[in-house]
Amino acid sequence: MSRYDVNVLLYRLKKDRGFREQFRRDPRAVLAAADLTDDEREAFVRWNPRRLNELGGSLHLVLSIPDLGAH
Amino acid sequence: MGQIVYAAAMSHVLHPPYYEKNVGPHGKRMVEELIAVVAAMGRELAARRPDALVIIADDHLNVFSFDAVPAMCVRIGRSVSRMAQEGAIEFDRALDGLAERYPLHEDLAQRILEDGLEAGFDFAASWSAPLDHAFLSPLSVLHGERPMTPLVPFWVNCFVAPMPSARRCYAAGQHIARVVANGPWKVAVVATGGLSHFPELSLARVGESDPEFDRRVVGWMERGDHESLTALTAKELHTTGSHELLNWMVLLGAVGPVPARVRFFGEMGRIDLAALDWDASP
């Protein structure tokens, strides 16, 4: 489990609009250099906040990413 | 000689639209009742004419990131801003329309920090951290139209494991009380957050609370049973969704084992709401 990397990505998605837009356009490309397990990468690509939370993603991050939040 | 002239703890999303959307009319009504109680508490706070207000709350991954999460952090400097978050979650819409900057009580903050390090509390210091709803939602209701009391914001890491223990938070509160006693100021102390919600910080369990646990905890506070409160483990706080009680532990340490007065207690389902105060007069 890459708890740090998952949360760094979630934090950046919350705070950095440009990064968020790139992610929405091409998530695989944005995640290419990230140190994630296959499971984590799939949860990002398919945007599955519940799975990201199960994999160690902070609840308060997955709840609060503009336009992608799980709330 | 300084003195704690006011002490209270309360839930910190004092924003009816959030509960209306996520709980329904019953949630909205309940938080409106709580807001009326907190506003009345604010008038009592103002009557004590504090020089400074220490406010103890948590960060919701708004301010600190996984790059570094301080166990406890004192905000120093001369003023503090309201958090700006584009596309803010409903919690933080409670901040819309509030003032953008607030005064800090620089001298008290500095004493808590420096005397803390001297006494073995390795507090972090921040010159720039802004305040989210956990601070400003209760502060804005407590102050109403009155000017903001100069603040000492104090963060406790309630959400990024491993968190500080209940006992350590309590000890930090005892330290704050010693600093106040040794200084010249009249000080209010307010802790925010809770009661139980978001058990295990699991998205699948958002919507659950643990009223039985909340009744027990509030009962201990009413009886001044701080032994039972500080014996709560990280696992118990996590399982029940009571992470934010760590903020309350700091306040309990500051006031000592005197009985609390329950001003509001409401079981909502998604979260249980409360407001308590402590007789801080000597």
Image: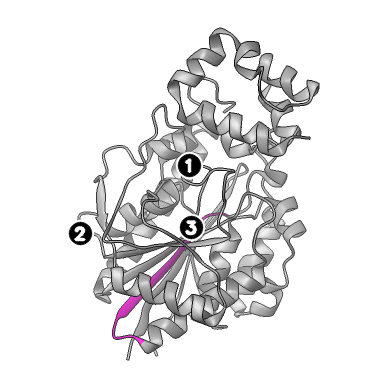
CB under 8 Å between callouts 2 and 3? no
Does residue A60 show up magenta in the picture? no
Kind of residue at badge 2: Arg
* Residue beneath disc 3: B57
**Which class describes the residues within 10 Å of circle 1: few (<14), some (14-19), or many (20+)?**
many
Q: Which residue is mark 1?
A: B62
Q: Chain of mark 3?
A: B
* Mark before the other along the chain sequence, 2 or 3: 3
Tell me the kind of residue under disc 1.
Answer: Asn
Image mark count:
3
Residue indicated by mark 2: B146
First in sequence: mark 1 or mark 3?
3
Discs 2 and 1 lie in a common subunit: yes
Marks 1 and 3, how far apart at CA:
13 Å
**Up-down: is B119 above or below A21?**
below
Q: Which residues are magenta?
A: B183-194
The answer to whether the residues at label 2 and label 1 have Cβ atoms under 8 Å apart is no
User: Which image quadrant for residue A27?
Assistant: top right
Marked residue nearer the N-terminal end (2 or 1): 1
